[in-house]
Amino acid sequence: MPELPEVEGFRDVLNGCGRGRCVRRVDVHDTDVLRGVGVRRLRREVEGRRLGRPWRHGKLLIVPVGDGQALVWHFGMTGELVCARGDDPPAAHDRVVLTFADDRQLRYRDQRKLQGIRLAPNERALRRLLDRLGPDALEISRSDFLDLLAARRGAVKTVLMDQSLIAGLGNLLSDEILWRAHVAPGRPPRGLDDTEARQVFTAMRRVLATATRAGRVPPRRTWLTGHRDDGEPVCPRCGERLRSQRVAGRRTVWCTHCQH
């Protein structure tokens, strides 16, 4: 599932493929990925316009189009952006294709179609969309993060994955962060002491820094993510067998020896 690092990678794709270029044609091959906008309006508002500088908030990728409008991508479980040439063969899951004046194409590819593309008609509409999200995981301050944890019940992993509280973290990132912080995913966040809460924040920043450079959550053998799908996964830190259980509705992997 695309999380913050993958969306940063898609931003790089959009920067190199479409930024500053005029959209000559919009082809919608599957309307199921359009959210709140129809094909005619999408083509009317985007064709003949130049794409601005893309930016990201959490898992959303936003690019200005024309005067005050913006395209907003939410990649769901399987979405991605691909840069291609007009004569490159189409893929089975290419849903929306923007073709530029130089015949370069930006292709939105998505197998499961759980989310998709929105058109924000103005800055106010875009702000309403972003107001549903918490601060970006790369931008939140340590003091705000600590205050957030101190005020929440439930499981700490649930808080990390709640996009209305912190935007950008998903299942893999949350497991990796908590493993590095030595904190069990089911711990109530308000029960963490100051040292533990700071460890979670520091782990989040370090994991995001490395993952963003890689453009994904890297499956390194020194990381929890490099072991979670092994047949009999063991902790890369202590060698103990990893435990797997559903937390917040998602498969959660952790080390009962290292994480308390």
Image (cartoon, rainbow, N blue to C red):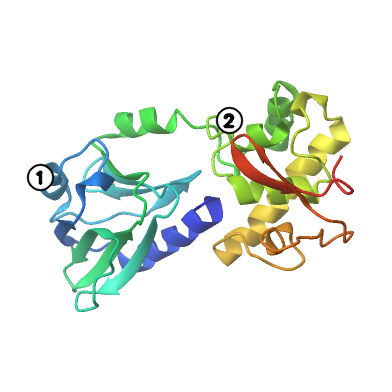
Q: CA distance from mark 2 to mark 1?
A: 35 Å
Nearer to us in this view, 122 or 98: 98
Query: Residue sitting at 87 percent across and 57 percent down?
Result: 240
Q: Secondary structure at mark 2?
A: loop
Q: Residue 128's image quarter? A: top left
Q: Residue lying furthest front in this view? A: 231
Query: Residue sitting at 38 percent across and 53 percent down?
Result: 54
The label number, if any, that marks residue 40 in the structure image: 1
Q: Residue lying furthest bottom in this view? A: 87
Residue type at numbered disc 1? Arg
Left or right of residue 30, residue 161 in this image? right
Query: Residue sitting at 38 percent across and 32 percent down?
Result: 129
Q: Position of residue 182 (x, y in %)?
A: 84, 45
Q: For the residue carrying disc 1, how many other residues have a C-alpha within 10 Å: few (<14), some (14-19), or many (20+)?
A: few
Query: Residue sitting at 19 percent across and 65 percent down?
Result: 99
The label number, if any, that marks residue 92 in the structure image: none
Left or right of residue 258, residue 74 in this image? left
Q: Is residue 138 visible?
A: no
Of the image marks 2 and 1, the number of the one nearer the N terminus: 1
Left or right of residue 103, residue 139 in this image? right
For mark 2, what is the residue? 165
